[in-house]
Image (cartoon, rainbow, N blue to C red):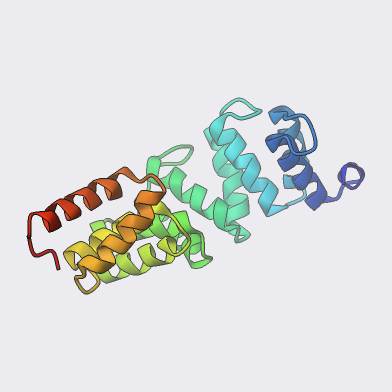
Amino acid sequence: MRAAAQEGDAQAQCYLGVCFQNGQGVAQDNHEAVKWFKRSAEQNDPVAQCYLGVCYWMGQGVPQELGEAAKWLREAAEQGDPAAQFNLGMLYETGQGVPQNYAEAVKWYRESAERGYPAAQFNLGVFFEQGQVVEQDFAEAAKWYLLAADQELADAQCNLGLCYQTGRGVPKSAAEAVKWFIKAARQGNKTAQHNLGLHYAAVEAGQNVE
C-alpha cells in the first residue's frame, strides 16, 4: 500500500494518511498524515480533500487555517462527499473560514442528509424544528430525526423522543417517547436520561403520561 502511495495512487495515499492519523500499522503522526492527504487531495480525491480540510480546521498536523479548511471541504463537497458537505455546512453555520450563512449551511446539510449522513440529518431536523431559514415544519423535523436516530445518533434519538412526547410532527405517544429516550440514554445522552427520570417519576406518582 505504501508502494502504491509512493507511485502516486490517490486512494492509497489517502488510506496511508488515515493510517498515520490513527496509528494503524504505523506510528501515529499527524504531520505525515497531512503529507499524504495533501498528495491525494491534489489529485482530486474527495475523501482526502475532506480529511485535509478537517486537519486545517482543527489544526491537526498543520497550523489551523480556516480558509484552507473551507477550500478543501468545498472541493470535496462539490464532488458529493457527504462528510465534507456536513463539515462545510458547519463552517457556514458557525462562520468559520466563510461568512456566516444559515441558508448555505442548510443547503449543504440537506445535500449530506440526502446521502444518508446522520449528523447532517440531525442538524437539518433542528433547522426545520426551529423554523430558521426554512419554514417551520415539525413533521419534516421528525422525519430527519428518525433517519438519524435509526443510525444510532443519540441526539437525534433524544429529539425524536421529545417529538413523540409533545406530539410535534408525529402522533403523541409516551411509549414511543420512552423507547427513543432509552436508546439515547444508553449512549449517555444526559437530556434523555433526565427525561426518562421525569417520566418514571410521573408514572410512580400515578400521573397519566400517555
Answer with the quarter of the image where residue 190 lies.
top left
Tell me the residue at 66%/47% (across/down).
Answer: 49
Q: Is residue 104 above or below residue 176?
A: above
Measuring from the top left, give residue 102's x and y in whole percent: 35, 51
Judge whether residue 103 can be spotted in this image: no
Residue 210, image x and y in percent? 14, 68
Image-quadrant location for residue 61: top right
What residue appears at the point 71 percent right and 42 percent down from the top-left corner?
A: 18
Percent x, y of residue 157? 36, 58
The residue closer to the viewer here, 4 or 198, is 198
Q: Nearer the viewer, residue 20 or 39?
A: 20
Side of 85 where 159 appears, left or right? left
* Residue 65 against residue 72 in the figure, above or below: above
Residue in the image at 31% along x and 69% along y: 140
Residue 50 position, x and y percent, is: 62, 47
Evaluate whether residue 171 shows in this view: yes
Residue 13 falls left or right of residue 94: right
